[in-house]
Image (cartoon, rainbow, N blue to C red):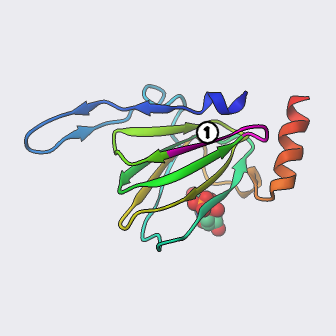
C-alpha cells in the first residue's frame, strides 16, 4: 500500500541551553535529493491547503512553527497526521492525495520537494486522481 510508505521521520536534534538545532541533509534524512523548498505561512484560521496529489514528486513536510493536520489518501486508505514539532517531518511519496487543515495561529509549514515546480505533475481533481492511482496499480 502506498500510504504505508508515508512515514513520520525524526530529524537530528542538537539540544543546547542557547536553543536547539535541527539539520536536514539531502538523501540522508529525507529519502530523496532536495530540489526545492517552499513554505506556507500567514494561513488564516479555518483555511485548507493541499487538495491535490503529485504524479512523481516526493515531499517532506515539517511544522516549522505551530501545528496543522495532514490527511493522506492513496485512493484506498486514508491516514491523518498532526504535525507540531520542528524536529519531525512527514515523508509523502508520489501518488498521494493530501489535505492540510487545522492550522494553528502562526503556523509555518515548510515543504522540501524532489523536483522544481511543475504544474503538469499535479492531479487536482479527485476523480482523476482515483483513476490515475487505480490505473497505475491494476
Ligand atoms: P499549491 O501547490 O496548489 O498549494 P498548496 O498545496 O500548498 O495548497 O500551489 C498554490 C499556487 O502556488 C499555485 O498557483 C502554484 C504556485 N506554486 C508555485 O508557483 N511554485 C511552487 O513551488 C508551489 C508549491 C506553488
- Residue drawn at x 64%, y 44% is 72
- Residue drawn at x 42%, y 71% is 42
Where is residue 113 drawn, in percent x and y?
Answer: 55, 44
Residue located beneath label 1 in the image = 58
Quadrant of the image containing the C terminus: top right
Quadrant of the image containing the N terminus: top right
Q: Which residues are magenta?
A: 74-81
Where is residue 88 drawn, in percent x and y?
Answer: 39, 38
100 sits to left or right of 24: right
- Res 99 → quadrant: bottom right
Where is residue 55 drawn, in percent x and y?
Answer: 75, 43
Among all residues in the image, which is located at the extreme left? 17
Among all residues in the image, which is located at the extreme bottom? 44
4 sits to left or right of 133: left
Tell me: is circle 1 under 8 Å from ligand 1: no
- Residue drawn at x 86%, y 43% is 132
17 sits to left or right of 92: left
Considering only vertical position in the picture, is 137 above or below 131?
above
**Label 1: element kind:** loop
User: How would you rate the neighbour count of disc 1 (Cα within 10 Å): few for under 14, some for 14-19, many for 20 or more?
Assistant: many
Asked if the magenta segment contains residue 77, the reply would be yes
Asked if the magenta segment contains residue 114, the reply would be no
- Res 9 → quadrant: top left
Point out the quarter of the image occupied by ligand 1. bottom right
Where is residue 5 drawn, in percent x and y?
Answer: 62, 28
Amino acid at each position: 500500500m502506498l500510504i504505508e510508505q508515508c512515514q513520520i521521520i525524526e530529524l537530528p536534534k542538537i539540544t543546547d541551553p542557547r536553543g536547539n538545532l535541527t539539520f536536514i541533509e539531502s538523501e540522508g534524512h529525507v529519502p530523496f535529493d532536495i530540489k526545492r523548498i517552499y513554505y506556507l505561512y500567514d494561513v488564516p484560521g479555518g483555511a485548507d491547503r493541499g487538495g491535490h496529489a503529485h504524479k512523481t514528486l516526493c515531499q517532506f513536510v515539517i511544522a516549522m512553527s505551530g501545528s496543522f493536520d495532514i490527511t493522506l489518501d492513496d485512493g484506498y486508505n486514508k491516514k491523518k497526521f498532526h504535525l507540531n514539532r520542528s524536529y519531525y517531518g512527514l515523508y509523502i511519496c508520489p501518488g498521494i492525495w493530501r489535505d492540510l487543515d487545522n492550522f494553528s495561529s502562526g503556523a509555518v509549514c515548510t515543504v522540501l520537494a524532489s523536483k522544481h515546480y511543475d504544474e503538469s505533475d499535479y492531479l487536482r481533481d479527485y476523480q482523476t486522481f482515483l483513476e490515475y492511482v487505480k490505473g497505475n496499480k491494476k
